[in-house]
Image (spheres, grey):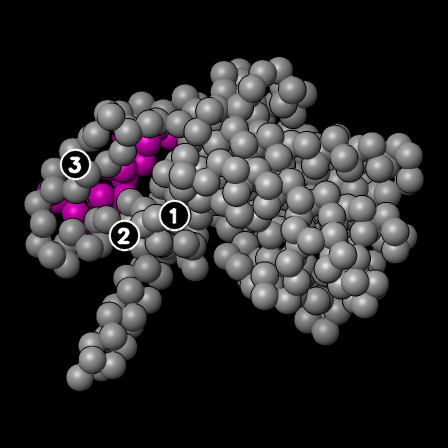
Amino acid sequence: MKYLITGGAGFLGQFLQRELVSRGIDASKQVILRSKDCDLTRQDAVEDMMRSIRPNVVIHLAARVGGIGANRENPGLYFYANMMMGANLIEAARNIGLQKFVQIGTICAYPKFTPVPFKENEIWNGYPEETNAPYGVAKKALLVMLQAYRDQYGLNGIYLLPVNLYGPGDNFDPRTSHVIPALIRKFVEAQEKKANQIEAWGTGAASREFLHVADCARGIVDATLSYDQPEPVNLGAGREITIRDLTHLIARLSKFTGEIKWDPSKPDGQPRRCLDTSRAEKSFGFKARISLEDGLEETIAWYRQHHSAAAEEHTIARA
């Protein structure tokens, strides 16, 4: 069995590689596809790549994605890139007779006012929250494509919906990062500069659920090995927290004692996000193991260590 992992060198991909190895799927059986290796938005390039590699299983992680600000600035890019990458890969998978296609979807595909906790059968009952709708709709369309290809061509494609991820190695770029790495960076830098205030977007009233990246990797492998049904499956932790409470929790864990100033002119995004994860537990035994507080402590420590190392390297380079 040969596994092709698109975006496999990224944040989630690195954890997924290690999880596969822990299940006996050696690194030599994993082909890690980076963006420089193949332009997945070009059908001819994808067809050539798939014929050359001849994988048995594709786990499609690659995506163009960011936080609220990045979604507002790049709606066309995020729709086109995510739609075309998935569509090209699924069509190429059909053409080579792939055994299994694992599509990683997004929580942004759910309607803006989905009843909490989100159940998979609610995914079509409304339009996604406006700031990330192009991204969410593009990813949701791939669910339809996989189900259609299963019906017509017999392609075994599954669709997983992870909730917001976080953990060591996350994207801490302030232009494109999600809420947890963005807040961690703000608090750490505020301490370094001895600032007594940080600014947080929105009102803090919106709620989110967060899944540690290692738990997500485990859930993806569980499904890859054990789930073969057309229905989408949520992957989550089962705990909802408001952005305001999350912000104060990260402040406490990072030992920031200054003021948090909220900017209500910035969008809150979808009002609530919390998943019903019973289908994942029932279908392939997945349940999150890492608590939010433990995961945040680990992520803050990772960022401090790597942020300090990067600053030291920069200082040496300038000397």
**Residue 32 falls in image quadrant:** bottom right
Question: Which residue does the image show at 76% across and 63% down from the upper left?
Answer: 49
Question: Which residue does the image show at 22% across and 44% down from the upper left?
Answer: 252
Q: Nearer the viewer, mark 3 or mark 1?
A: 1
Q: Is residue 246 magenta?
A: yes
Which residue is tagged 3?
260
Please state, as top left, top right, bottom left or bottom right, where the N terminus lies in the image: bottom right
Q: Is residue 231 magenta?
A: no
Which residue is tagged 2?
185
Up/down of 56 relative to 135, above or below? below
Q: Residues within 10 Å of mark 3 (few under 14, many from 20)?
A: some
Circle 1: residue type:
Ser
Per the rendering, the mark at residue 177 is 1
Q: Nearer the viewer, mark 2 or mark 1?
A: 1
Circle 2: residue type:
Arg
Left or right position of 75 against 81: left
Q: Residues within 10 Å of mark 1 (few under 14, many from 20)?
A: many
Q: Is label 2 in contact with label 1 (beta carbons under 8 Å)?
A: yes
- Which region shows up in magenta? 241-258
**74 vs 99, nearest the viewer:** 74
Circle 3: residue type:
Ile
For the question of whether residue 24 can be seen, the reply is no
**166 vs 292, nearest the viewer:** 166
